[in-house]
Amino acid sequence: MERYNIKFVEKKWQDIWSSKKTDAAILDKNKKKFYCLEMFPYPSGKIHMGHVRNYTIGDVLARYKKLNGFNVLHPMGWDSFGLPAENAARENNLHPKDWTKKNIETMKKQLKLLGLSLDWDREISTCDPEYYKHQQEFFLELFKKDLVYKKDTYVNWDPAEQTVLANEQVIDGKGWRSGIAVERKKLSQWFFNIKKFSQNLLDELENLKNWPDKVKLMQKNWIGKSYGCEINFKINKKNKFDKIKVFTTRPDTIFGASFLALSLDHPVAKIFEKNSNFVSFKSECSKMGTTEEALANAEKIGFNTGLFALHPFDKKIKLPIYIANFVLMDYGTGAIFGCPAHDQRDLDFANKYKLNVLPVVKPKNVDASKFIIKNEAYTEDGILFNSGFLNNLTVNHAIETIIKVITKKKLGKKKITFRLKDWGVSRQRYWGCPIPIVYNKKGDAIPVKKKDLPVLLPDNVDLKVTANPLEKHPTWKFTKLSTGEKVIRETDTLDTFVDSSWYFLRFCSSKYKEYGYKLTDIKYWMPVDQYIGGVEHAILHLLYSRFFMRALAYNNKKFNYIEPFKSLFTQGMVCHETYKNEENQWLYPDEVEKNSDGNLITKKDKKRVVVGASEAMSKSRKNIVDPEEMINIYGADSIRWFMLSDSPPERDVQWSLEGVSAAFKFIQKLWKLNNEILNKKDSISKTNDTELQKAVNKTVYNVTKNLENFQYNVVIANIHEIYNLIYQHVINNNTSNRTLKKRILIEACFLFLRCF
């Protein structure tokens, strides 16, 4: 075959790999294992170029490790529960199960066209009852360990998706999927006690040596360990609350305090539940979310309780007590003292309600009499003044001093707190894992027995009803205990991030029916040696997965793993220019062409096209390219080659049709060169044999080193270099055919065929 026939060659070898199950992993204790895993996809319809890049990166590594004698586990599955399926089914009058199954079939076919070295025998789908029955069992185990609980709380309510969102799922005050501003709503919700492991989650970040620093920093900041103290403020009026506990990280600013602010959920707030002005205030607050980010960006508003707190160091000073929208109950004590001069949030609030602003920290070498705070708080380091016994101390020294004094006078105590909140997992929707809990007439939560798992979703469901379809189902939620007692099922389903928090364990024992994993399997395969996925999951998925491992290990001597992923690699996005027509409507790249002047126009009506910035490929902006179409034209190897050659894997790659075409041409050149070498007749040894052999050995060394360091673009550059050298030796006939045909040379020349 003189010319590389992509359709013939790729299909031939993909069929052979499939029939021989060359990528099926078998537990072999005589071999060193390597568990390679990419974040599994959501079956949205078709794969996109982001999938191609992500899975190609993992595929290169898996093949490389296998060639080095490792027993490689490289599985694939589907994150198949979730609201998008429910919404799509609602819009298209389909069942979510049918929509999901169809999409899985399509995407699986496309992934197979890429020739990935995936173990399809271990394929899982999170919406499969065989998967989620084990998840329900895990839930019950965590419930027994007191790591799962239910409480009434204010939540982030997405009005578009009609469901609750965890704090981590709210971005800039908006739902992470819908992009709609979240609201504050009180509901009874199930929580995972992730806060219990705050310190351990933080400490173990230091041991994740092969994780990107940026990911570890993001998690560290989200866990948010704060050092400070708890101060008791006495209230001037007698009621059932004689004092209010306040947590602060800046006790040094106590002499600049001008008010106290309490959360809407603070026990003191209950005193005013029948106050009409307070009811109106709560209603206004309900239009805002509950996250720190949402509240930070919202206008600072408060309700004056009419109560006063006595300053702990000067009883003559009375601090007005407000209930404020920017204070969170689940951080610290749900109460703060406001020092407007040194906190912008407090300053905005004080200016709004005309409260006192007294600076107590000034920059060094600044005259205290001339240091005034107006509209911008001073939050930098400095020297204390206007602060009694703290005057002339640095901020750090003042903090240490005031904590000692507060402790000695029994006005409070030193305390550590965390920003991390417990994970709310209740979702008010149909297409998710049912929570295995029922309620008796008293409202007591009763765990479903293991023998009755899985709690299956009903097939006959009306998705057009408002609110939760399971709550509105006429029969499903009504059932009986073995005693005959009538009970009601929990109608909330689990957050889909629960599904992905343990799937890597299931891949180790995907066919095991007795439990979610087989202990002997995970002892061999876990942890995942290399995990690959987007940095956008640094908080949500990665933090939840780390928690879930700890939850399973808690009070479980047989399960001693706490970190699921030994190494983490975060790949860049695949980007493409964006296009709009004159009506400001997005256009697909295949709807655009160049005219004779080199300007972009629409293919249909030859009108001007507005070229926008290059952005990550997105269905909403239509700047996507169909991988299957590209594979049919250029072949899978060309697409994979381009994806890895254009830029380092951790950086964004700019999609280029010219780049894909160049990759295809290079593969043709390699194919042609190989044929020329194989068809050459034997000749006598030439003086340049040693030179070429050294160059090949050097290439093998460099490729190996760069593969180990994820420098795939450099690997491709290495192969280009050795190709050029071999080509010169062939055309100049200055190397013996015997040397050219040596296995080491052939393997070096075609390393990409084995790895890429």
Image: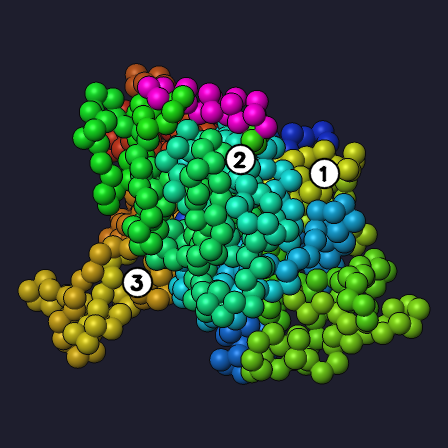
Is 457 on the left or on the right of 610, as rendered? right
Disc 3 element: loop
Specify the amino acid type for callout 1. Answer: Ala
User: What residue lies at 45% left-to-right and 33% top-to-bottom?
Assistant: 314
Image quadrant where residue 394 sits: top left
Disc 1 element: helix
Marks 2/1 in contact by CB < 8 Å: the verdict is no
Specify the amino acid type for callout 3. Answer: Asn
Between circles 2 and 1, the one closer to the viewer is 2
When the figure is inspected, residue 604 is found, relative to residue 450, above or below; the finding is: below
Which of the marked residues, 2 or 1, is nearer the chain's N terminus? 2
Specify the amino acid type for callout 2. Answer: Ile
The span shown in magenta is 391-410
Q: Position of residue 446 (x, y in %)?
A: 81, 61
Mark 2–mark 1 distance (CA, rounded to whole Å): 36 Å
User: What residue lies at 48% left-to-right and 48% top-to-bottom?
Assistant: 308
Q: Is residue 660 magenta?
A: no
Residue position for label 3: 623
Quadrant position of the C terminus in the picture: top left
